[in-house]
Image (spheres, rainbow, N blue to C red):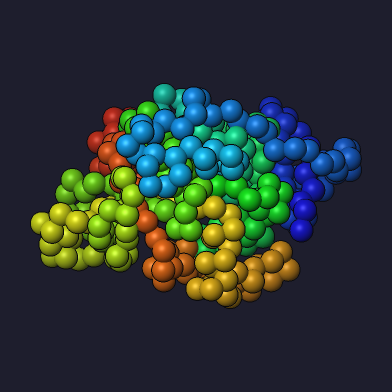
Amino acid sequence: MVAEFAILESAGAARGAVSDFRSYGAAAENARGKQAVIRIESHRHRPQGGCSLDRKERRGFGGCRSSLLKRIALILAGGAGTRLRPLSSDDNPKQFLRIFDGQSLLQKTYARAERFAQSIYISTNEQYAAKCLEQLGRVNLLTEPARRNTGPAIAFCCFEIEQREGECVIAVLPSDHFIGDEDEFVRVIEHAFAFAGSNDHLVTIGIEPTEANTGYGYLQLDGEIAPGVIRLERFTEKPSRERAESFLRAGNYAWNAGIFVWRASVFRRTLQEQAPQIAAVTLKNYETMPSISIDYALMEKAPRVAAICGDFRWSDVGSFESLERVGVNVAALLKT
């Protein structure tokens, strides 16, 4: 399937490219009455520098040879952001709140992705498509026909990206996370691109835990398979306080950041093997797909999963307390 792209314009909003997976609501219908549907090429974002890994890190997984594959960022921007209510709402979830020096988490995520990705795609649902265009301007926007969690959404988008781009390496990035050290984040993602580009592993990004937090998933790590790359033994979703404390004491666990990097073909084949129902997702059957996360649908069952850990002052800012910790004056925001 090759998607068509329509150029949409709205009052006060920049133009944006919207992937026409199906009729894109009233706004798109109105726009199509005024403008022709055309095909456009994805934007080319030139990464700053090349492969930033040193020689030691390059040994064992092909080093910069994977730079021959195009680097894609897929930003997930369809979440409802219910944990920050009343600051957020159904119409204005967390990723769209302009609370970081006048920018939203979505805008900051997109700007980070421009540092390492040659093309960027935004995955959202029809409810938030206009907001994405308003905040980002002209973008490659993939709209879900219905909310079915990250399993079907990521599968559908990665298949579409592979159709358009061919073999490539895709970084899947949540749009609503805070990253304090962006240079370190870019280094970790470039490391993941280099490894995933030349190995048949799915890569997940881990965060060194600083506390026994029961609100995060955990990754059990089991031995280095390449410089800076660790075999993943097990995923554990949001453990009890007692288990989280035992993970911290064990020293071989990391927080699951929900950030993934993989080659398009490796993801497709692994999904077909481990989750054939999700791998069968199409436009026509999307609404019949089960609502399931990519962790449960694939990552917990996949035979070849590797972790690359980083310390880039990450937070999923899922509570008012976590917002305060990253410098947001929540009390002032709630008064406005």
Q: Residue at x 49, y 29 (%)?
A: 50
Residue that lies at the very extreme toward the left in this rendered image: 249
Q: Position of residue 173 (x, y in %)?
A: 48, 46
Quarter of the figure that contains the N terminus: bottom right
How far across and how far down the image is residue 54, in percent?
36, 32
User: Residue 302 falls in which quadrant of the image?
Assistant: bottom left
Return the residue nearer the eye: 293 or 68: 68
Tell me the quadrant of the picture where the C terminus can be found: top left
Q: Position of residue 27 (x, y in %)?
A: 76, 45
Identity of the residue drawn at 87% across and 38% down: 35
Query: Closest to the observer: 209 or 145?
Result: 209
| Res 120 visible | no
Q: Is residue 155 above or below residue 308?
A: below
Say whether residue 26 is left or right of residue 123.
right
- Tell whether 48 sits left or right of 137: left
For residue 148, side relative to residue 332 (left or right):
right
Count of marks, rendered view: 0
Residue drawn at (54%, 52%) of the image: 263
Residue nearest the observer in this picture, 23 or 223: 223
Q: Is residue 45 visible?
A: yes
Q: Position of residue 15 (x, y in %)?
A: 72, 31
What residue do we see at 47% from left, 63% from top? 294
